[in-house]
Image (spheres, rainbow, N blue to C red):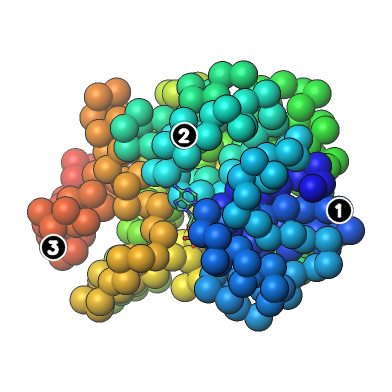
Amino acid sequence: MGEISVLGAGAFGTALAISLAATGRDVTLWARDAEAAQVMQANRENARRLPGKAFPTSLTATSDLTKACEGRVLLLAVPMQQLAGFCDTNKRLIQHKTLVSCCKGVDLTSERGPLAVLEDTVPDADVAILSGPSFAVDIADGLPTALTLAGRDQATVDHLQTLLTTANIRLYSSLDPLGVEFGGALKNVIAIACGLAIGAGLGESARAALMTRGFAEMQRLALRLGAERDTLAGLSGFGDLVLTCTSEKSRNFSHGLKLGRGAKIDPTVTVEGVATAKAVAHLSRSLEIDMPITTTVTQILNRDISISEAAESLLSRPLKRE
Ligand SMILES: NC(=O)c1ccc[n+]([C@@H]2O[C@H](COP(=O)([O-])OP(=O)(O)OC[C@H]3O[C@@H](n4cnc5c(N)ncnc54)[C@H](O)[C@@H]3O)[C@@H](O)[C@H]2O)c1
Ligand SMILES: O=P(O)(O)OC[C@H](O)CO
């Protein structure tokens, strides 16, 4: 087994493993389902999550978590709401390792981001976060992007920045993991709002207004929690907001779009913004931070109000300075 393992063989974990292994590094991709791992290893693709994207020769798929955790650097690519449970259950195997969260969301139970979840559940690990504009399918196709690698410790961040850079992923480093994780989490909620607006026929101008005012509320919360303003304006905040709010490749945007059109929702698709909207709406209430778009998205998701009622309520708020 090589130095790098990716735990979680969904779309993103698989795409990262492909990009990393394409550089010639030995990379292990762990899937919890033994049969799925065997089929992936034999067929050299993840037909369920990333069909047609061939595995480089140095990529090994396995369901043996003990073996996968022999690597020193473990990238965690499970859905956000599974992260705490996964780390807690497998603490013995992942402690003392370098853990890099690839999740974008806020944990419903603790109302905290992935880095804090890792620090709480595996206090003996070195932790970092990878986030920014990146559709799994683009990464697996070798298309270029730039992401942010953030941690608290300069040496860890420097090491990971070099180790995880690939031919198509340019990594920028940051010592503001809180800003990075909250940018990545909050943009998903705004993407649902944009999908709702486009799906309900409210138009492109409404989307631009939601993105801009959404960005304002992302900043309000993140800065209050201690993030730096520049981080929110960077790849993991503004950069990912733009990508996610403007592409039907985004599951968050598409979720809103479907709801806006009254179309059927596939409950098996990972849509991080749904749980994150709930967690953030609650968090913003307790911190008394004004987040009208996030609150409205939660009300629509809970079916408390319709999209037209939501638009009316957002438009009729007291007038204020930008
Ligand atoms: N797909 C993307 O383009 C993309 C890009 C950047 C970041 N992300 C982030 O990566 C994270 C994962 O997303 P994804 O797209 O890979 O989702 P996905 O739905 O494609 O895959 C999730 C994977 O996690 C596995 N899983 C679920 N619960 C688990 C558990 N308890 N233990 C072990 N494995 C478990 C599932 O079997 C599945 O293989 C999310 O937080 C997402 O926001 C995704
Ligand atoms: O498909 P989404 O909406 O989870 O978005 C994927 C990535 O976060 C985009 O950077």
Residue 97 position in % (x across, y down):
69, 29
**Left or right of 216 on screen, residue 151:** right
Q: Contact, CB < 8 Å: mark 1 with mark 3? A: no
Of the pair 272 and 92, the residue shown nearer to us: 92
Q: Amino acid at mark 1?
A: Arg
Circle nearer the viewer, 3 or 2 = 2
Q: Which residue is mark 1?
A: 25
Where residue 14 sits, quadrant-wise, is: bottom right
Residue 18 position in % (x across, y down):
73, 63
Q: Which residue is mark 3?
A: 306
Q: CA distance from mark 1 to mark 3?
A: 50 Å
State whether residue 202 appears in this view: no
Q: Which residue is mark 2?
A: 89
Ligand 1 under 8 Å from disc 2 Cβ: yes
Question: What residue lies at 83% left-to-right and 67% top-to-bottom?
Answer: 57
Count of numbered badges drawn on the protein: 3
Circle nearer the viewer, 2 or 1 = 2
Question: What residue lies at 46% left-to-right and 30% top-to-bottom?
Answer: 88
Q: Amino acid at mark 3?
A: Ser
Q: Amino acid at mark 2?
A: Thr
Q: What SS does tag 2 mark?
A: helix
**Left or right of 227 on screen, residue 39:** right
Give the answer, above or below, for where 210 lies relative to 91.
Answer: below
